[in-house]
């Protein structure tokens, strides 16, 4: 008979143990720590600031980088003090003393950053001929990708004075405009129907939330107010966004970038061909999203969903998940995937690296944070016992496990994840934990969870890709025509929204103005990363489900950190992510879930 093992780790008080940094705000080591950071930083700065030999001789560059890495590994520009007060001020946001102490070390750190900037700015200016020799130099293999990224970005750098002018003028030519539109919107207020059925004046930010109300009267009233606010501000948004696009066009022309999204890809360490393969694969399967919305409309017993109704929840997600029970559940799932995952989690719990419960003044979100390589990872949660909270543990833990795997294999200059794959580990763990919950839930609950899961997947994958394509066409049209009216922008917007939503969602009157409040189109092309992270994760999940031993490759990928681009890392594992098939495997996972959900809804007699 198989032995049933009790799989549990005791969660204890579940507050951060910050002792590895300091014992408290009055710890005398704080002062000493800052002095040491200053000493070590200037030791590095003063050694190299007047030298140019490291820019000519690869062997000397290796010495310089070794020293740079050692400094960044143990001290950085704010040492333990910066990390400690950052963490403390997230535990207690209302304590002005903590804020003041954090600001002090932050200022100190900025000065060191400025004083040390010369180092990589000068490396970026190395001539292309020598760059090539440096990248081929055996002794520099350890830092090859670090250097390659600096060189790749430097291809689009202008001269120092030109960069300075662009930088100084960036606020007046772009970000002030964007802030203005957002500022106007946030000041708006309208009288709407509240959840309690009263009529009340509400600010813009709360009206946005009410559009997802389960009560039709409430969400329709909110949508009407929301649309009214957007119409009122569309004129000014038109002027604003045309300026922002013109500024972007000028910058791109000066820098001679081949495409409007080139610099985004470079910054995220992802090749344009990989993003293109992703966008194309997802676009070809927009029918998955359309089928999902059609299913939702049938479940909600309406012919079509209004544009603002597409996120309204179906069913009730109940269930209580106290912290101890949640931790055990996540621990069990991790253990099944890989024992090392479970060990890392147990270590976090044992060493007080997780701050679990809500508290007055504490940051009300969730995050996983790491700073220097020699410092512990910390996770902040606000566990209240909902199903969503269990997934949050899994998500943040995914980040934490990712950090620990990188820490073991890489040096300080590679101790992080590129933006394009930052959410792979987190969504990977989240999805496996959700699978486990779904399997033990009763049918009604299972249907509600699966619908919510699909809603999240559709929003992260299909909606973001549709948005990316909207952005691409906006820049193309703007560059061709020189100016876009709000009507033209609205038409483009609806075209791209309809493309992924299909026929079951109305492009309702008023929705043509929703671009007015979309902030991300003002920051250019980063939305693909929601889709890339989640789909890479799903593609890997698919492979692990086929063959549990594949987890070794997943771990190798996660442990690679910034040591190479995701394409090259996967390439070494025998996976080609510029191949559309890779992305299709991820999309298959979403489609399988959709098929299952449809079958379940039919079996329960919810749809015919
Ligand atoms: Zn995350």
Image (cartoon, rainbow, N blue to C red):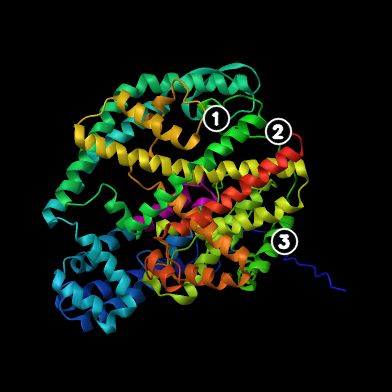
- Residue at the image point whose x is 50% and y is 33% from the top: 502
* Residue 566 showing in the rendered view: yes
Q: Residue 301 in the image: x percent, y percent?
A: 66, 26
Q: Which residue is mark 1?
A: 504
Quarter assignment of residue 128:
bottom left
Q: Is residue 433 left or right of residue 235?
A: right
Considering only order in the chain, which callout, 2 or 1, is on the residue closer to the N terminus?
1
- Camera-near label (3 vs 1) is 1
**If you read the primary sequence from the N terminus, does the residue marked by circle 3 or circle 1 appear first?**
3
Q: Is residue 423 visible?
A: no
Q: Secondary structure at mark 1?
A: loop
From the viewer's perspective, tell me whether residue 557 is left or right of residue 50: right
* Residue occupying image coordinates x 31% and y 52%: 264
In the figure, 74 relative to 422: above or below? below
Q: Is residue 9 magenta?
A: no
* Residue depth check, mark 2 versus mark 3: number of the one nearer the observer: 2
Q: Position of residue 35 (x, y in %)?
A: 36, 69
* Residue span colored magenta: 89-108
């Amino acid at each position: 008979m198989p032995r049933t093992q009790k799989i549990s780790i005791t969660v204890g008080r579940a507050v951060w143990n910050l002792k590895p940094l300091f014992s408290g705000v009055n710890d005398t080591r704080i002062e000493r720590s800052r002095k040491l950071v200053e000493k070590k930083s200037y030791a590095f700065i003063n050694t190299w600031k007047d030298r140019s030999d490291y820019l000519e001789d690869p062997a000397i560059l290796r010495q310089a980088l070794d020293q740079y890495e050692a400094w960044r590994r143990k001290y950085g520009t704010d040492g333990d003090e910066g990390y400690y007060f950052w963490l403390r001020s997230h535990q207690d946001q209302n304590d002005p003393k903590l804020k003041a102490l954090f600001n002090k070390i932050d200022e100190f750190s900025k000065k060191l950053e400025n004083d040390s900037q010369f180092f990589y700015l000068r490396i970026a200016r190395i001539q292309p001929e020598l760059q090539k020799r440096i990248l081929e130099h055996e002794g520099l293999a350890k830092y090859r990708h670090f250097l390659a990224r600096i060189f790749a970005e430097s291809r689009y750098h202008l001269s120092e004075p030109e960069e300075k002018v662009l930088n100084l003028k960036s606020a007046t030519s772009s970000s002030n405009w964007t802030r203005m539109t957002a500022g106007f919107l946030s000041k708006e207020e309208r009288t709407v129907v509240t959840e309690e059925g009263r009529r009340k004046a509400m600010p813009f930010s709360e009206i946005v939330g009410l559009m997802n109300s389960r009560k039709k009267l409430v969400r329709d009233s909110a949508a009407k107010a929301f649309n009214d606010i957007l119409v009122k501000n569309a004129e000014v948004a038109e002027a604003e966004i045309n300026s922002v696009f013109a500024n972007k066009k000028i910058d791109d022309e000066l820098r001679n970038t081949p495409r409007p999204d080139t610099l985004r890809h470079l910054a995220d360490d992802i090749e344009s061909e990989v993003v293109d393969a992703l966008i194309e694969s997802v676009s070809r399967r927009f029918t998955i999203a359309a089928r999902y919305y059609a299913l939702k409309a049938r479940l909600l017993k309406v012919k079509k969903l209004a544009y603002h109704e597409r996120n309204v929840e179906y069913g009730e997600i109940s269930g209580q998940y106290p912290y101890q029970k949640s931790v055990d559940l996540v621990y069990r799932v991790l253990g099944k995937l890989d024992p090392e995952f479970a060990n890392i989690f147990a270590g976090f719990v044992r060493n007080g690296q997780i701050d679990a419960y809500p508290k007055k003044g504490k940051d009300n979100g969730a995050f996983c944070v790491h700073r220097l390589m020699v410092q512990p990872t910390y996770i902040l949660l606000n566990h209240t016992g909902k199903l969503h909270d269990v997934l949050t543990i899994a998500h943040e833990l995914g980040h934490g496990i990712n950090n620990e795997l990188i820490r073991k294999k890489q040096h300080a200059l590679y101790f992080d994840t590129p933006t394009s794959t930052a959410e792979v580990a987190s969504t990977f763990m989240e999805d496996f934990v959700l699978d486990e919950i779904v399997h033990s839930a009763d049918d009604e609950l299972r249907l509600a969870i699966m619908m919510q899961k699909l809603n999240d997947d559709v929003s992260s994958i299909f909606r973001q890709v549709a948005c990316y394509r909207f952005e691409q066409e906006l820049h193309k049209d703007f560059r061709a025509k020189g100016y876009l009216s709000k009507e033209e922008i609205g038409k483009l917007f609806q075209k791209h929204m309809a493309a992924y939503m299909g026929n079951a969602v109305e492009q309702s009157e008023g929705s043509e103005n929703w671009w007015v409040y979309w902030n991300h189109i003002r920051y250019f092309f980063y939305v693909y990363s929601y889709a890339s992270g989640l789909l890479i994760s799903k593609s890997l999940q698919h492979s692990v489900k086929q063959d549990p031993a594949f987890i070794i490759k997943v771990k190798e990928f996660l442990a690679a950190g910034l040591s190479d681009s995701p394409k090259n890392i996967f390439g070494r594992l025998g996976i080609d992510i510029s191949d559309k098939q890779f992305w299709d495997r991820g999309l298959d996972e979403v489609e399988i879930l959709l098929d299952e959900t449809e079958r379940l809804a039919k079996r329960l007699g919810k749809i015919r």
